[in-house]
Image (spheres, rainbow, N blue to C red):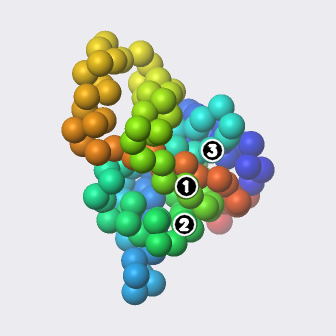
Amino acid sequence: MDLDDARKYVRDHHHSVLATLKSDGTPQLSPVTAGVDAAGHILVSSRETAYKVRNLRRDPRVWVCVFPDEFFGRWVQLEGRTEVVSLPDALPGLEDYYRDISGEHPDWDDYRAAMERERRVLVRIELTKAGPDRSG
């Protein structure tokens, strides 16, 4: 699958499972909400203390399966390398992430305070591969 087609799919479908590697090499899976920034990176919001963030700081390889709200139907698997952006640098990207997925927030000051309180980070994924190219 073409990477631009994959990005288009993620712009319309946000339910995802993100896979990282634990220190013993086994997968760690997390349900996440995925978005796409203006540069074409896949974005995920997480907490600084989450296992997936610890795993990505050690090994930036990541896999994401994105599927429709109905769960069944067309889906896409993405592969890439991540950059974890912490606060305060993450805040503009977290705001864009929210807007992309949910629209305008009713109280941006409250949103920013929640991001600080929850110690949110922005996981930015540079895509290297996407698929499937056909159904089996």
Q: Is residue 136 visible?
A: yes
Q: Is residue 68 visible?
A: no
Placement of 10 over or under 126, stated as above or below: above
Q: Position of residue 7 (x, y in %)?
A: 66, 42
Tell me if 86 is positioned left or right of 130 in this view. left
Q: CA distance from mark 3 to mark 1?
A: 10 Å
Crowd class of label 1 (few under 14; some 14 to 19; many from 20; radius 10 Å): some
Residue at the limit of the structure toward the front, as seen here: 88
Callout 1 touching callout 2 (CB < 8 Å)? yes
* Residue at figure coordinates x 62%, y 44% from the top left: 41
Amino acid type of the residue that numbered disc 1 sits on in the rendered structure: Glu
Mark 1 residue element: strand
- In the image, which disc is placed on residue 83? 1
Mark 1 or mark 2, earlier in chain: 2
Placement of 62 over or under 75, stated as above or below: below
Q: For mark 2, what is the residue?
A: 60
Callout 3 touching callout 1 (CB < 8 Å)? no
Q: For mark 3, what is the residue?
A: 41
Residue at the limit of the structure toward the bottom, as seen here: 24
Q: Position of residue 115 (x, y in %)?
A: 30, 35
Which image quarter: residue 135? Answer: bottom right
